[in-house]
Image (cartoon, grey):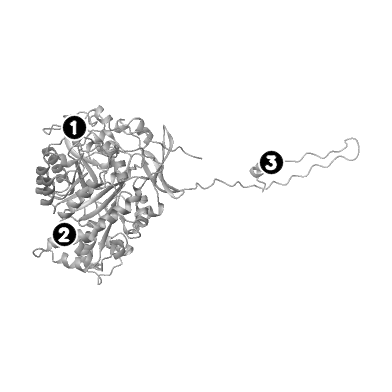
Amino acid sequence: MTDTLAVHAAGGGVPAPSDVDAGTGPAPSPAPEAEPARLTWGEGMPLRGDRVRRYVNAFCPRCHTEDPLRPLAEVERLSGWLAERDGRVWLERGCRRHGFVRTLYDENPEILTYLEQWTAPTKWHTPDSPGNYDPVPSAYLRGLGEMQTQHTCILLEDVVEGCNLRCPTCFAESSPDLSGVVPVEDVLANVDQRLARENGRIDVVMLSGGEPTLHPGLPRLVEELARRNVVRILLNTNGVLIAKDEALLDLLARHRDRMEVYLQFDGLRAESSRHHRGGDLTAVKEAALARLSARGIFTTLTMTAALGVNDHEIGDVVMLALRTPFVGGVSIQPVFGSGRAQPLDPMDRLTHTGVLERLGPQTGGAVSWRDLTALPCSHPHCCSVGYLLRTDSGEWRSLVAMVGEERLKEHLGLVANRIADSEIPRELRRAVQQSLLGLLSEQSSLSHPSVGDLWRDVCEACDLGIATLLKVAAAVGLPGRRDALRRLMGERVVRVTVKPFMDMNTMIEERLTQCCVHVGTRSGAAGDGAAGDGAGDDGGAARRDQCAPFCAVQAWPTLSAQRLSHAAGVLGGSADGAGSPGVADVRRRSPRPVRIARRTP
């Protein structure tokens, strides 16, 4: 059959008649019918050269930089994806105003794939405003909305605006110039509202700021929190006062069974301290750490890590934790583009998987990325966690290495359980699952009151080579055994976490809705942006204690204006009430411009 499309495509047709002499010889024969030309197939479209890992809702960093105070109801959620290309993972989205926008999301696709294996069911939450189906981010003007998929593991309360340092790197943009102090009653009102919505229990309340040790009512605040059903109280501090203030150290020691210190600790070199803190504070940090360790106060070294500044010191900080009693953890937080910081290149930055990738080479193989898992209760990109245990033989090993990757997944219920009932009784298996989920969560650390029970359940089911820990944990109810367990945990167990906070260059909606680190906020006061911006029927008229995901509060100044400390700052540092910052106060926390890559052909 003649294919006319093929002929047309091949340029075929009837050939021109032969040249004949019209005056002689017979009439020429009709020209024969031409053969159809062969179809020539095109090559089609080339492969993209990347691999789309998942489709996401994201935001435009250029729009945000141009107008950070845009009403949240007008913030566009952009269709996009996470694409693997050239050995990295990129966040790519399309903006009606700025076209194609690409920024670096993560450095190592292999490690990101590994982390995505570790997910577990989340917990129910109670919305702050029933019926709040506003889209992200405007939903958070009224607190946690109906579509949030995780409860509050950590409630972060900013209790002061000011600080005794003026750090070049400060996510809160704090300084000695700010003087807002949140009244104790206001902090407790926010905590009590969260308690009511968390079924009468909060896993962690973190006191932050500014510098929370400057709060004049800190002793009373800690005492009041200790009377409530708050499992643990964390103090997020630069350590300046801890290094010299005996009364403060005594307060922490009195509550050491419920309190833990998150000590800002950026490395061992003076250069790192100068970059992040504006001066050499290494001696101050060492003094604070020594005093906390001597008093048996569990401490987590909180490292702000930046590419080309102190990312080569990640291993040093981990190894310091392994050799320092009562350093129960290390939390490594890559610099992100919120607050006050050095300019950040969104195309080349330290990321979650970049930190994990550096662990092995920098610790001589003592700790590697396979010793950590994603936090099962959270989004797998939001946090990774691992426990290191010193065995009876003196060797440091990880929980993952001791139990085994696949067996750990089975215990967590992340894969089909192949453990026979005859091997592990059903009740113990359930206890092990709950204990492991408790250990591998935002709210757990060595200062957790039930950590001995968690480890006992795990040790009974898994041969971890730590018989002494099992023996002490099992006898914890005997006189004097709890103190023995605290010391054993303080000397032989270290928790390592990597916490990559999002900025507008890495922000995706699914991580916000599954976030479990929430900031205490208050809506309904003048200037907080709630009125007329998705505030609901009350128009924002009534003050309401609530909370919102940490990264959302950091990214959008309108949400940041709802922090309790910002409200107190408007009143000139008075501790007798709370207000709300106006536009001028919010604008001073507006983000600086960043470089965004244009699409390349």
| Amino acid type, mark 3 | Gly
The kind of residue tagged 2 is Arg
Q: Are marks 2 and 1 in contact (CB under 8 Å)?
A: no
Question: Which residue, given by chain and number where applicable, does mark 1 sit on?
Answer: 569
Regarding mark 2 in the picture, which secondary structure is present there? helix
From the image, tell me which residue sits under label 3: 11
In this rendering, the label closer to the viewer, 3 or 2? 2
**Residue under the image location 75 percent in, 44 percent down:** 33
Q: Is residue 67 above or below residue 502?
A: above
The answer for how far apart the CA atoms under marks 3 and 2 are is: 87 Å
**Could you tell me the amino acid type at mark 1?**
Gly
Residue pictured at 25% horizontal, 27% vertical:
584
- Which residue is under mark 2? 486
Q: Does label 1 or label 3 sit earlier along the sequence?
A: 3
Q: Residue furthest right?
A: 24
Seen at 16% across and 66% down, the residue is 472
- Residue 306: x and y in percent read 34, 45
For marks 2 and 1 on the same chain, the one whose residue lies earlier in the sequence? 2
**Disc with the residue nearer the chain's start (3 vs 2):** 3
Q: CA distance from mark 1 to mark 3?
A: 79 Å
